[in-house]
């Protein structure tokens, strides 16, 4: 039983994380390239998204792992043999609940501490990209604004940006002086001052204009060092948004009098309780998985697998909507989030009771028959292709 649950659980968790990462990766690449940042930052941003994806994938993985294990027992008639020998669902659920409690603790650590910090780091990387703190890439063939007073154009870049050619640079200062230079080659060098870099130009011409110059001054050079003051970069804000708070900090803001105002307190209460109900709901998943795993007699339909995913995703979306309502003060946050939990829990207990305690009980039997009739009706409506000789 343990291995039967572990294999699909891990497979589902890895598959869900990969699909979510691939979906986000394309948008992140587009965002980073448009912001002119290094492509390597995409992997750092994706790494900070993994805790959020795992917090979503763990419940689905737990559900499918248990469901597929019991479905395998049911289709091979091993489940009937175990029940005939006196082994009830209560004993069979011991191993699934070991997984459920273990993953509950893991998920609580993720949503309570790991995910809030990784979300803050992710937002920090987005801020750094927009502000240029990560070192904005110079776009070849375009006029690049470095700060408010410097314009730079590079025609060609080689060796990962260390060899630049076809250079035009123009710098204006506050006194009205303008320095323009063209050069065949150029290269950036670091200096002892972290706020200043050195742009070494080779084989070019420099033009200096100023209000007190009757004519511009020109200079042909083989090598010229142009110091460039890096623009000041704003610092990212401190961690403090609701979704960035650790669980203990969130409790303090929700009920400990640390909220800035009533709206802040409502948002903290809503965010606190959506984290809690999502974690506590994992205790219901083994019962739901068993209720959906056993198909009706003489049927090998996969309807239960489909319904399990629909129920888990629907419950997550209901919680998100309830969190918004609670944060806006339209409904008390505790009521908005725990009432759907009680409704789903009651439905799951009923489905499990029908399967475990009613002779021949099949909680999805009615749905199975309805889907079978619907499939027959659809097939009748489709045009039949006559067999040609």
Image (spheres, helix red, strand yellow):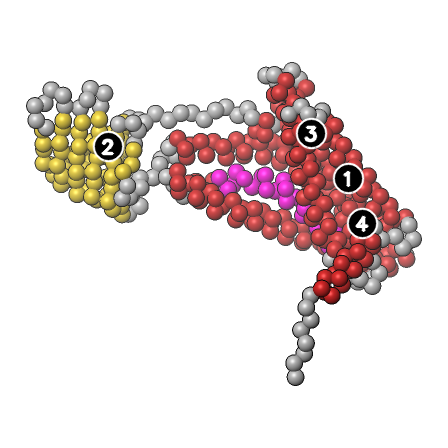
Residue at 59% across, 30% down:
243
Which residue is labeled 2 in the image? 198
Evaluate if marks 2 and 4 touch, with contact meaning CB atoms under 8 Å apart: no
User: Closer to us: mark 2 or mark 1?
Assistant: 1
- Magenta region, main secondary structure: helix
| Left or right of residue 57: residue 84 | right
State the residue position of label 4: 291
Q: Do the residues under discs 1 and 3 have CB atoms within 8 angstroms?
A: no
In three-dimensional space, the C-alpha distance between marks 1 and 3, rounded to whole angstroms, equals: 16 Å
**Dot 1 crowding, Cα within 10 Å, few <14, some 14–19, many 20+:** some
Label 2 or label 4, whichever comes before in sequence order: 2
On residue 344, which mark appears? 1
Tell me the mark number nearer the camera, choosing from 4 and 1: 1
Instruction: Name the image quarter holding residue 370.
Output: bottom right
> Which residue: 59% across, 34% down?
114
- How packed mark 4 is, by other alpha carbons closer than 10 Å (few <14, some 14-19, many 20 or more), is many
Query: Which residue does the image show at 60% across and 48% down from the upper left?
Result: 16
Q: x, y (%) of residue 286?
A: 77, 45
Of label 1 and label 3, which has the lower sequence position?
3
Spatial separation of the CA atoms under disc 2 and disc 1:
64 Å
Residue extending farthest bottom: 389
Residue 178 seen in render? yes
Which range is magenta? 45-70
């Amino acid at each position: 039983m343990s291995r039967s649950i572990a294999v699909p659980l891990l497979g589902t968790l890895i598959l869900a994380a990969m699909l979510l990462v691939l979906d986000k990766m394309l948008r992140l690449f587009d965002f980073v390239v448009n912001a002119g940042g290094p492509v390597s930052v995409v992997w750092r941003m994706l790494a900070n998204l993994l805790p959020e994806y795992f917090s979503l994938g763990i419940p689905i993985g737990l559900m499918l792992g248990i469901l597929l294990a019991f479905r395998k027992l049911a289709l091979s008639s091993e489940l009937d043999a175990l029940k005939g020998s006196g082994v009830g669902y209560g004993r069979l659920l011991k191993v699934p609940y070991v997984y459920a409690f273990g993953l509950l603790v893991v998920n609580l650590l993720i949503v309570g501490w790991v995910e809030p910090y990784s979300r803050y780091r992710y937002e920090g990387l987005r801020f750094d990209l927009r502000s240029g703190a990560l070192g904005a890439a110079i776009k070849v063939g375009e006029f690049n604004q470095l700060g408010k007073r410097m314009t730079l154009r590079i025609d060609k870049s080689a060796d990962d940006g260390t060899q630049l050619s076809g250079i035009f640079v123009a710098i204006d200062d506050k006194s009205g002086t303008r320095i323009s230079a063209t050069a065949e080659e150029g290269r950036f060098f670091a200096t002892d001052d972290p706020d200043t870099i050195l742009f070494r130009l080779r084989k070019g011409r420099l033009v200096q204009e100023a209000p007190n110059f009757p004519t511009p001054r020109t200079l042909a050079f083989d090598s010229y060092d142009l110091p460039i003051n890096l623009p000041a970069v704003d610092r990212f804000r401190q961690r403090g948004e609701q979704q960035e708070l650790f669980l203990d900090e969130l409790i303090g803001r929700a009920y400990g009098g640390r909220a800035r105002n009533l709206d802040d307190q409502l948002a903290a209460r809503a965010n606190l309780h959506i984290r809690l109900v999502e974690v506590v709901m994992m205790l219901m998943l083994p019962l739901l998985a068993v209720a959906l795993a056993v198909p009706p007699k003489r049927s090998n339909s996969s309807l239960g697998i489909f319904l399990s995913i629909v129920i888990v995703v629907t419950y997550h979306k209901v919680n998100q909507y309830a969190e918004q309502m609670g944060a806006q003060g339209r409904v008390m946050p505790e009521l908005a989030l725990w009432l759907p939990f009680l409704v789903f829990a009651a439905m799951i207990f009923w489905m499990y009771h029908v399967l475990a305690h009613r002779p021949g009980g099949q909680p999805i039997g009615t749905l199975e028959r309805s889907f079978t009739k619907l499939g027959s009706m659809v097939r009748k409506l489709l045009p039949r292709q006559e067999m040609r000789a």
